[in-house]
Image (spheres, rainbow, N blue to C red):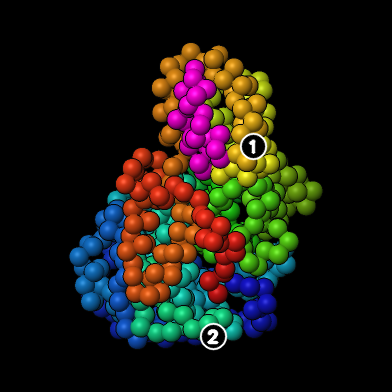
Amino acid sequence: MNRPSEHQGTDPLAQGGTTVTPSSSLFAFDNSYACLPEHFYARVSPTPVAEPGLLRLNQPLAEHLGLDPDALSSPTGAAVLAGNLIPEGAEPIAMAYAGHQFGQFVPSLGDGRAILLGELIDRSGMRQDVHLKGAGRTPFSRMGDGRAALGPVLREYLLGEAMAGLGIPTTRALAMLATGEEVYRERIEVGALLVRTAASHVRVGTFEYFARRGNTEAVKTLADYVIGRHYPDCTEAAQPYQALLEQVVKRQAELIAQWMLVGFIHGVMNTDNVAISGETIDYGPCAFMDAFHPQTVYSSIDRYGRYAWDQQPRIGYWNLTQLANCLLPLLSDEEDEAKQRARAALDTYGKAFEARYYSGLRRKIGLLDDRTGDDDLALDLLGRMAGQQADFTNTFRALAEIDADDPTTDTTVRRLFADPAAFDQWALQWRERLATQTQPDSERQAAMRAVNPAYIPRNHRVQQAIDAANNGDLEPLDRLLEVVSQPYEEQPDRAEYRQPPRPDEVVERTFCGT
């Protein structure tokens, strides 16, 4: 994730990299992206850090990846994870990509501080990238130092695990390491490195990199690669590349709907931050809402609300339109026919988003069957929440605790509204609707608890964990990780993590790690 102002007009692939003597093997690498033509990446090894230190290893993820947590926790393992030693089978590369950043096209971005170490097959048979973020300068670094600070690394580790706990597709962190170095941002910060795993790191911006250069052959090679890796069923379609576009459209529409249903704001939905796999990627200035308002923005660099909570569906469509433009030469040799096929694929976006979003809203308010007027009932609640500064997460969770036949159980949720009468008016209609359901009310409550988290990584808690970590204390991180990894479970001994921030704890702005 890079700022538009960092772009320079040089060709990064004209530069070279260095090599490192291989160490003993810790990974059973099975690389595929490095087998693509050389202009898809730059071969470059990580820059060794001064004092690699393993801060946290994601042991469940390591085991799922078929790795040995004890070996990774050893000094040799830490050296490998930090990029100081290159394991057997690794083919470190920095991937080339472009991107639209806040609507402005930047022709050459690429992995400016990240290196794809290699790929492996996890225990479920899925291919996963192992990616070092903060691994030093690459030919794509432009004016950057290639390093990462502890705060952004911790945020990405924590937010990725929270998203996984919520059941939303996401990249994840295998490890977080100290580097023994300082990095210079607006102030001197503690250096760190993130080991990220992902279904892949192919982005919309990867397609843009080649399409904007007029390299249709490379676009086709990339499309074929993506089909083989992520969407193999497309090979059976009459129009494989249109089918590819339709599948990517569907996954992105559903992903954004899932974000919105938990109050998540990505913060920087540039095309280089849109994963073709359909995973959430690049946790920079992101946040979960406290008090609900549809225009909520946290990112310090989103000055005009382009990526606000309620703008995410529109921006998702815009980003996918850029992908469609890249694929036009593959859709048909006839320009008009190619555009028609692209539009047909893009037209599925709205239906896919609305189907996932509105079905999710209905489930969030406990409607177990679908009836006319249900969507309006859910939207009415959101409008009242926005007008009354009601907490997004706590409102929906508190609804699950209400007895449909006993209004005296409304006390908790009523307190979340500045004027409780606003909720009371809505609750009358809601109870009338619940009365039409044949299932026991306990079934409705259980279904609501399964989709309405009790715990999210609230901004002030994330910041507290960052501040503590910068002072050498990782206990707040560990506690928060434990809580958000089981967001739907009641955790009585962690009830304080459900509370929104006090006025003096509110974090209004989040920042990009670069």
Residue 416 visible in the shown view: yes
- For numbered disc 2, what is the local secondary structure? loop
Mark sitting earlier along the chain (2/1): 2
Residue 452 at x, y percent in the picture: 47, 38
Q: Find out whether residue 61 is within the magenta segment.
A: no
Residue 132 at x, y percent in the picture: 41, 71
Indicate whether 272 appears above or below 228. Answer: below
Query: Spatial distance from mark 2 to mark 1, Cα to Cα?
Result: 62 Å
Q: Residue at x 47, y 64 (%)?
A: 463
On screen, residue 108 versus residue 44, left or right, reads right
| Amino acid beneath label 1 | Asp
Name the disc covering residue 15, or none. Answer: 2
Q: Find out whether residue 409 is within the magenta segment.
A: yes
Q: Quadrant of residue 465?
A: bottom left
Q: Residue at x 41, y 50 (%)?
A: 497
Residue 472 at x, y percent in the picture: 34, 74
Badge 2 density bin: few <14, some 14–19, many ≥20, Cα 10 Å? few
Q: Residue at x 25, y 68 (%)?
A: 72
What range is drawn magenta here? Answer: 393-416
Residue at numbered disc 1: 419
Front residue of 107 and 369 = 369
On screen, residue 62 versus residue 160, left or right, reads left
Front residue of 175 and 68 = 175
